[in-house]
Image (cartoon, coloured by chain):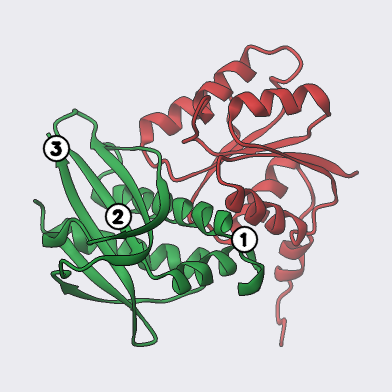
Chain colours: A red, B green
Amino acid sequence: MAYNVLIVDDSKSMRNVIKKVLKISGLELGEILEAGNGREALERLGESWVDLILSDVHMPEMDGIEFLRTLAGHEDFRDVPVVLVTTESNEQRLEEAMALGAKGYLRKPFQPEDVRSLVMKILGVEDEWELAGSDEGCDF
Amino acid sequence: MNGNWLEAMKAAISEVLETMYFTEVSFRDVTPGAEAFEGWRARIEVNRADGNQAVTLALWLRSGFAKELAGNLLALDAQEVRPEDVKDAMGELANMVAGSWINQLGPDAWRLGLPDAGPVECPVSGTDNASQMFSYGEPVGFAAVDPTGP
């Protein structure tokens, strides 16, 4: 199964970084969609089916928390899993995000491995890298 | 002015540059001169949650170094990096540095603003709380913590 992913971040550089991380993750990818804030993300969701959303929190126009709140009230999109990729470290804000339906969060700066393992876990995809790493006596 | 602020900013810069921009820098605390700095500046305001204090974190980077960082972040060769790439990469750098800075000083005590970045030709501000950055021994810019009010 190929997964369509929506990346929401006001930084084009960060969207590109996340896109590259996904491409090397081993996850079978379909379409990768991009949006610069929550409002644009809602437009993208209306255009294509999305299996996973990776969203920043601090964004102009509609931030990640407001985006989650809108998604939660939307019949068609409320079940799309959302992972926050953010500089936000305020516990209260993160708890609010989780209460609104976020499936997890990653703090920037991140290691590519952190993105890959969380995405695989949330999508329920068997992680071949992890399986390979679990072999005992693996010599290089 | 909290003496830990600049130390926390240096630690935040190192963490972000090493993780996302594949670069290391060293620091030397200095008082920058009054002469104009030519390069890129990225700033972000952080505010105390209780509204009692605002601080601006600023990064001043030489053009060549800013371009190199943008290239590293985007996995582009230097000649492929456009000014809009540098602007975006600098803004994201400030955003991540500020996030890491807040995380060290107390995630619940501070709120992050939105970054801005652009080319500048003016003296480095926040001069009492600045540190010069070096990459491979070459000066590449300044980091400054500037209490802005109230």
Judged by depth in the image, the label closer to the viewer, 1 or 2, is 2
Decide: marks 2, 3 in contact (CB < 8 A)? no
Within the image, what quadrant is residue B150 found in?
A: top left
Within the image, what quadrant is residue B50 found in?
A: top left
Instruction: Give the residue furthest to the right.
Output: A1
> Which element carries disc 1, helix, strand or loop?
helix
Determine crowd level at label 1: few under 14, some 14-19, many 20+ residues with C-alpha closer than 10 A.
some
Where is mark 1, residue-wise?
A112
Horizontally, residue A112 falls left or right of residue A52, namely left
Say above or below: A117 vs A62. below
Q: Position of residue A30 (x, y in %)?
A: 86, 44
Q: Position of residue A81 (x, y in %)?
A: 68, 32
On residue B58, which mark appears? 2
Q: Position of residue B121 (x, y in %)?
A: 32, 61
Say above or below: B110 vs A41. below
Decide: marks 1, 3 in contact (CB < 8 A)? no
The subunit letter for the residue under badge 3 reads B
Determine crowd level at label 3: few under 14, some 14-19, many 20+ residues with C-alpha closer than 10 A.
few
Q: CA distance from mark 1 to mark 3?
A: 38 Å
> Which element carries disc 2, helix, strand or loop?
strand
